[in-house]
Image (spheres, grey):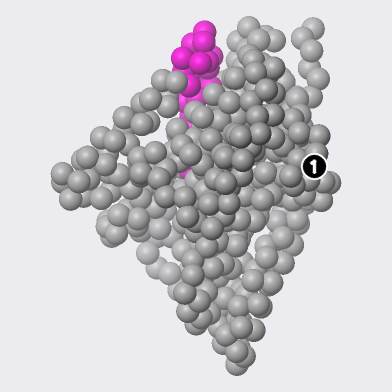
């Protein structure tokens, strides 16, 4: 029988926790106008955090699929989809229903014409229309962040088939990265020539290149672990990555648009390597509390816009100073997001996660 020891990468849940909280904090800054406060600063880290999520997803999925193919000689695409369905769909569709009901009953939203995109896992389409400032299809309130979940599902729709059918995963990954870069350049040109910003907005909101870079990192670590260890120990590279992280944190890393996700994905890859290989990383991503937050990260990401909206609705009417409103808004949004995500993970998601483990040919504790 093949070795079915559980594969575990140190610190992955810690990275998920940091990225999820970065998205929440970024969106709180963006939502200050909802409580009547003009703060004058936008903490634009959400896009980088989501790109890191994509990179991590490409890394882990690639490693697990290639391990399964090595052990069994093939990949069970059916079991792969069962695992993804059990992880993503219950919370995805559960929150989708609650969001639409909340929009209709509390916020009196009546336009749900783009609902089909969310039901069919193409929420990045209305997201792109909104980014292009075209009113053909608009995002549904509290569902704007679903664009990234749609991208994940689109990636899962074709990627396991490619890994299964092609003998060399490296060819698949380099091909996917190259194709996406060509698509982005062409989309940018088309948007420029036609004056229709949708094409590039769509290409930017479908960053499969981040998954490809994560996959290339997984392939490199699997095939050449000693090389990765040497790279990780290179002090100059550590300094460069640290500088890039600091620039990302203050939203000062501006890259030519078609390649914006690549630098962030590179940083995410290096953080994955550091977190897994360093015995004493800069930040303790292996702490049990941080690890648990990482396990809750899907819920943190999914629930936070509604918590933010409802919290803002309450705080906006308070007769207190702007400083107190900001403090309350930050504290209440983060607190209630964590409470809801904890309850969701413990009493709802874990049931499906336990079912999901039955279909794992290569066990994974991340």
Q: Which residue is mark 1?
A: 286
User: Could you tell me which residue is drawn at 54 percent across and 58 percent down?
Assistant: 250
Q: Which residues are magenta?
A: 149-173
- The quadrant of the picture occupied by the N terminus is top right
| Magenta stretch: helix, strand or loop mostly | helix
Question: Residue 5 location in percent, x, y?
Answer: 81, 20
Which of the 4 quarters of the picture holds residue 85? top right
Please state which of residues 38 and 70 is positioned toward the viewer in this rendering: 38
The image shows residue 102 at horizontal and vertical percentages of 54, 67
Specify the farthest residue to the right. Answer: 288
Please provide percent x and percent y for residue 81.
58, 28
Taking the spot 72% from the left edge, 60% from the top edge, the residue there is 338
* Badge 1 density bin: few <14, some 14–19, many ≥20, Cα 10 Å: many
Magenta region includes residue 93? no
**Visible residue check, residue 43:** yes
- Residue 357 spot, x, y in % from top left: 74, 30
Q: Is residue 195 above or below residue 6?
A: below
Q: Is residue 243 found left or right of 112 in the rendered image?
A: right
- Seen in the picture, residue 246 relative to 104 is either above or below; the reply is above
């Amino acid at each position: 029988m093949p070795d079915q020891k559980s594969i575990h990468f140190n610190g992955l849940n810690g990275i998920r926790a940091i990225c999820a909280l970065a998205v929440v904090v970024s969106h709180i800054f963006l939502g200050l106008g909802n409580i009547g406060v003009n703060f004058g600063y936008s903490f634009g880290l959400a896009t980088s955090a989501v790109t890191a999520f994509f990179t991590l997803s490409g890394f882990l999925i690639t490693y697990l699929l290639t391990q399964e193919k090595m052990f069994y000689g093939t990949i069970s695409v059916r079991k792969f989809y069962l695992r993804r369905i059990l992880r993503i769909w219950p919370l995805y569709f559960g929150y989708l229903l609650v969001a639409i009901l909340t929009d209709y009953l509390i916020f009196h939203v009546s336009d749900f014409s783009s609902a089909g995109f969310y039901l069919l896992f193409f929420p990045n389409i209305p997201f792109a229309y909104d980014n292009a400032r075209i009113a053909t299809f608009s995002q549904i309130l509290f569902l704007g962040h679903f664009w990234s979940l749609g991208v994940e599902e689109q990636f899962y729709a074709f990627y396991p088939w490619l890994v299964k059918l092609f003998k060399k995963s490296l060819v698949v990954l380099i091909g996917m990265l190259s194709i996406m870069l060509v698509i982005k350049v062409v989309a940018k040109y088309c948007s420029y020539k036609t004056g229709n910003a949708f094409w590039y907005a769509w290409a930017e909101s479908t960053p499969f290149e981040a998954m490809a870079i994560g996959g290339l990192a997984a392939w490199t670590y699997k095939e050449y672990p000693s090389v990765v260890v040497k790279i990780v120990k290179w002090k100059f590279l550590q300094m460069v990555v640290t500088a890039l992280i600091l620039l990302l944190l203050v939203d000062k890393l501006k890259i030519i648009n078609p390649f914006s996700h690549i630098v962030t994905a590179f940083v995410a890859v290096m953080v994955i390597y550091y977190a897994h290989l360093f015995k004493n990383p800069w930040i303790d991503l292996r702490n049990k509390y941080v690890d648990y937050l990482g396990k809750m990260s899907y819920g943190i990401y999914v629930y936070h816009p509604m918590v933010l909206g409802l919290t803002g609705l309450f705080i906006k009417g308070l007769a207190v100073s702007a400083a107190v409103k900001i403090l309350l808004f930050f504290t209440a949004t983060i607190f209630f997001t964590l409470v809801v995500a904890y309850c969701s993970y413990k009493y709802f998601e874990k049931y499906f996660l336990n079912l999901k483990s039955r279909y794992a040919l290569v066990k994974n504790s991340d």
